[in-house]
Amino acid sequence: MKKLLVLGGSEKTRPLVRYAKDQGHYVVLCDRDPESSCRELVDAFVQVNTVEHERVVQSISHHELDGAVSFGSDVNAVSVAHIAKALGLPGNPPESVLIINSLTIVWTSSSDRSIIGSCHRHLLKATHAA
């Protein structure tokens, strides 16, 4: 049985939690809200604000997790990246997630789409230089 950390337990996360449980996974939910709508579906609940990465890691490290995920939240995507890195779990580098989130913000807020091409070229140069 795999142990999975899910960050954020809002209503939109319920299908993810149900799927993980249906697949036989042990699910640890981390959410700041003690009344999280997914709380009754999971094996373990940790009440911690998901943006407090170090507190989350301290609160969940004893679970010996195999993976960490979030659903539908740019903020939690960044948190998952930091937490996965801290615990040595597979995942995207936090820096990459921050860049993608920044590009998404630029894309959705810019009426001038030419800026996206410029950002993309800069991102490619930075990636190849590293």
Image: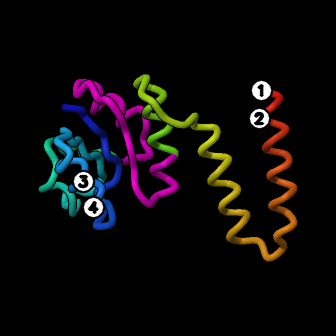
Q: Which badge, 2 or 4, comes first in the chain's sequence? A: 4
Q: Do labels 4 and 3 touch, CB within 8 Å? A: yes
Quarter where residue 116 is shown: bottom right
For disc 3, the marked residue is 19
The quarter of the image holding the C terminus is: top right
Q: Who's the residue at 44% across and 60% down the image?
A: 72
Residues at marks 1 and 4, CA–CA distance in whole angstroms: 37 Å
Q: How many marks?
A: 4
In the rendered image, residue 32, in percent from the top left (x then y), is placed at 30, 52
* Drawn side of residue 12 relative to residue 81, left or right: left
Three-letter code, disc 4: Pro
For disc 2, the marked residue is 127
Residues at marks 3 and 2, CA–CA distance in whole angstroms: 34 Å
* Up/down of 66 relative to 19, above or below: above
Three-letter code, disc 3: Tyr
What element does badge 2 sit on? Answer: helix
Residues at marks 3 and 1, CA–CA distance in whole angstroms: 37 Å
For disc 4, the marked residue is 15
In the rendered image, residue 42, in percent from the top left (x then y), is placed at 16, 48
Residues at marks 4 and 3, CA–CA distance in whole angstroms: 6 Å
**What is the span of residues highlighted in magenta in the rendered image?**
49-77
For disc 1, the marked residue is 130
Is label 3 or label 2 in front? Answer: 3
Three-letter code, disc 1: Ala
> Local crowd at mark 4 within 10 Å, few (<14), some, or many (≥20)?
few
* Up/down of 105 relative to 79, above or below: below
Q: Which badge, 3 or 2, comes first in the chain's sequence? A: 3
